[in-house]
Image: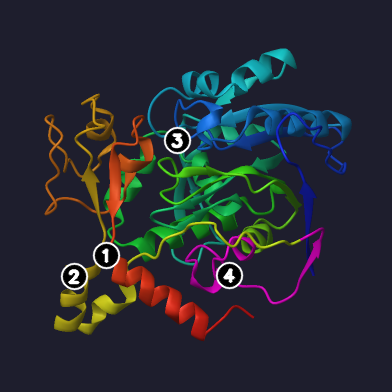
Amino acid sequence: MSKVILIPCANYQNEIKIPAIDLSGQKVLIKPNILAPFKAERAATTHPAVVEAAILLVKASGGQPFVGESAGGGSSEYAAKATGILEVCKRHNVPFVDLKTPVEVENLQGKRFKKIYLAKELEQFDAIVNVPKWKTHGLTAITGAVKNLFGCVPGLLKSQYHYKIKTRLEFCELIMDIYRYLKDKTKLCIMDGVVAMAGEGPSAGEPYPLGLIGISEDQMAIDQVFSEICGIDPRTVPILEYQKNIEVIGDKKKASDFKHYASFPEKVLHLGLLGWLMKLVFQEKPVILKDKCTKCQTCVKVCASKAISKDIVIDYDKCIRCYCCAEFCPEKAVKIQRNPILYLLNSLLQKLNPPI
């Protein structure tokens, strides 16, 4: 039975204590979520205080800590500096590693993707301590422990994966297969849920005071528990495999006002004309908020399908709905437009078929 520990933590000034594990003599990669060069207050990245707690844990457990990431929209070190994580690394004399060198690996554990590209830098580490931020996500419903391992794909290869993989469900299968490849090496998850992100995650949502640190050796289990806390049916999350028996230690208090959004159910596309009509009416799309847009060109650079022109106009015939434009926009100037009827239908279905 998997175990998830929930530790109340009202703010980042409180001391974050994590039970020790045996990492004696191991080189350990601490993998936060450093999405882009956003300040910690935006709640789009792992807070430096939680990374610091992970560093102290690895040292206390006999391991040699490193902090590493591959930010999707530019220099990883620059992004780490903006979040405050690089300062923590320097204070504790911990090297920061840019996961930047692509290497193709055989993925015998993969169900669909038998070969995947990951960072060659991973090969030097004996273990990974996963330190994600708990957030909603426009494409995968949630981003937590499992999704954070996608950050082990170097830089712009992430965007190339988005371009090559045309459907949401197939992309989620890629996320799951990357998780399966890294599962044995990923020894622990420390979930930053002190201030989570609700609504238009993973970067344009609103900070939400969830007040929790989560600890688990099972990445899937901790994502499921946090989903349930936030009112998200884990059986509807395409990057989770539902578990009936999870031991939760701590107060699993529900966050009843945590905002999350339904996504277009791509399984209906096989219904021919009916599926096409449903897609026409319900499928979400990115929309530029002109009053917020500064034309910084970030969305143009990260758009793998070249659907956004230099004057920031989206060609929806080219748009593949990967939402990287919304994810990396520094000004929150890209909104994912959804049909409100879809959200109401999804809410009704969850009430009729509540989580077990």
Disc 4 on helix, strand or loop? loop
Mark 3 or mark 2: which comes first in sequence? Answer: 3
Residue corresponding to mark 3: 154
Amino acid beneath label 4? Glu
Amino acid beneath label 1? Asn
**In the depicted view, which residue is nearer to us: 11 or 138?**
11
Above or below, 49 against 325 in this view is above
Residue corresponding to mark 1: 339
Amino acid beneath label 3? Pro
Query: Do tag 2 and tag 1 residues touch (Cβ < 8 Å)?
Result: yes
The furthest residue to the front: 257
Residue corresponding to mark 4: 241
Q: What stretch is highlighted in magenta?
A: 227-251
Q: Where is residue 100 in the image (x, y as percent from the top left)?
A: 47, 29
Within 10 angstroms of label 3, few (less than 14), some, or many (20 or more) residues? many
Mark 4 or mark 3: which comes first in sequence? Answer: 3
